């Protein structure tokens, strides 16, 4: 997602429960690289856990709904 008026681009990763530890480790690596975030590497904003929804919603569904 890009906020054109600010020039920011947001990127997110998702994973299955089995690989959660790998993403948490990646977060620790980013924390060690704090001084170069935003200069040489992307800024790490943190991890969040999402509650599983009963209905899966795809980006195409959201984009098509916003055009209606």
Image (cartoon, rainbow, N blue to C red):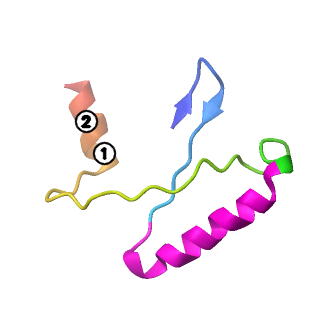
Horizontal side, residue 51 vs residue 41: left or right? left
Instruction: From the top left corner, tell me how far across and down residue 56 is, in percent.
Output: 21, 57
Q: Is residue 6 above or below residue 11?
A: above
Instruction: From the top left corner, tell me how far across and down residue 5 is, in percent.
Output: 59, 17
Residue 24 occupies which quadrant of the picture?
A: bottom right
Other residues around mark 1 within 10 Å, as few (<14) / some (14–19) / many (≥20)? few
Residue where numbered disc 2 is placed: 64
33 drawn magenta: yes
Q: Main secondary structure of the magenta part?
A: helix
Q: Is residue 12 above or below residue 18?
A: above
Residue where numbered disc 1 is placed: 60
The residue under the point 42% across, 82% down is: 18
Instruction: From the top left corner, tell me how far across and down residue 65 is, in percent.
Output: 21, 33
Horizontal side, residue 46 vs residue 17: left or right? right
Residue 28 occupies which quadrant of the picture?
A: bottom right
Q: Nearer the viewer, residue 60 or 43?
A: 43
Which quarter of the figure is the C terminus placed in?
A: top left
Q: Which residues are magenta?
A: 15-34
Mark 1–mark 2 contact, CB under 8 Å? yes
Instruction: From the top left corner, tell me how far across and down residue 11 is, in percent.
Output: 56, 48
The residue under the point 79% across, 61% down is: 32
Q: Nearer the viewer, residue 19 or 10?
A: 19
SS at badge 1: helix
Q: CA distance from mark 1 to mark 2?
A: 6 Å
21 drawn magenta: yes
């Amino acid at each position: 997602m890009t906020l054109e008026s600010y020039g920011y681009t947001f990127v997110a990763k998702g994973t299955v429960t089995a690989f959660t530890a790998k993403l948490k480790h990646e977060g620790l690596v980013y924390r060690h690289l704090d001084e170069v975030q935003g200069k040489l590497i992307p800024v790490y904003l943190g991890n969040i856990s999402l509650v599983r929804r009963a209905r899966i919603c795809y980006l195409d569904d959201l984009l098509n709904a916003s055009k209606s």
